[in-house]
Amino acid sequence: MASEIDYYEQLNVSRECDGATLKSSYRKLAMQWHPDKNPGDAAAENKFKAISEAYEVLKDPQKRAAYDRYGHAAFTNGGGNNAGGGGFGGSGFNDIGDIFETIFGGGNGGGFGGQQQQRGPARGADLRYDMEITLEDAYHGKHTEIEIDVSVGCDECDGSGAEPGTGVQRCGTCQGHGKVRAQQGFSVVERTCTSCQGRG
């Protein structure tokens, strides 16, 4: 959006400010514009959301560096603002390693000279927990215990997905990689295998 306001301007701080200054300015503005302090005021609610968004980006050193370099474009189209996203202007890369894997191959049978590299288990999705807190908790801080359900390895198949007494069979289409590659001009396109739906 061309009309998006600079995150530093939203928080009334300079680009060189440290974390303490950033936090102090955010807390002051959050208290001023919080919906509880301005009931029924849509403009105040929008202002509160905007400063909260700005603070979420600038308090994280990696997101702040991406914002300093690319501006709001670093977080559009699935970039760094959504949970687990990765920035880089919505290109679909989660980190710099993904860029090198896409260009040079990587762990799915590509790589330099066509060498196959077997990597460990793929990184799982980020976990997210939403919690409502009061304005006072936001200002003074809050400690609480939460419970989150997580996936664990299956004891019966040891995570292979194979029925007991049977062996693991590799997909004949992708040779167990879960992805297939196709050359299109000068670029190589990698897609999820349609035969095994990426299971390998």
Image (cartoon, rainbow, N blue to C red):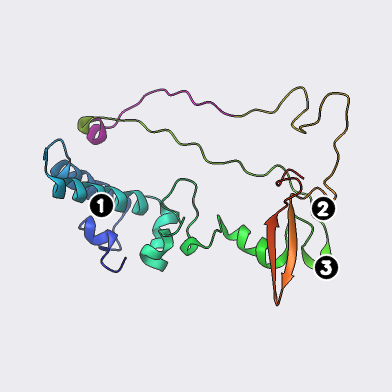
Q: Type of residue at label 1?
A: Ala
Q: Residues within 10 Å of mark 2 (few under 14, many from 20)?
A: some
- Quadrant where the image shows the N terminus: bottom left
Q: Is residue 162 left or right of residue 44?
A: right
Residue occupied by mark 3:
113
Gap in angstroms between the C-alphas marked 2 and 3: 21 Å
Crowd class of label 1 (few under 14; some 14 to 19; many from 20; radius 10 Å): some
Badge 2 is on which residue? 173
Q: Position of residue 159 (x, y in %)?
A: 74, 31
Residue 144 is a magenta residue: yes
Residue beneath the point at 37% across and 66% down: 71
* Closer to the eye: label 3 or 1: 1
Q: Which residues are magenta?
A: 137-150
Type of the residue with mark 2: Thr
Question: Would you say the magenta stretch is mainly helix, strand or loop?
Answer: loop
Using the numbered discs, state the Cα–Cα distance from disc 3 to disc 1 in whole angstroms.
49 Å
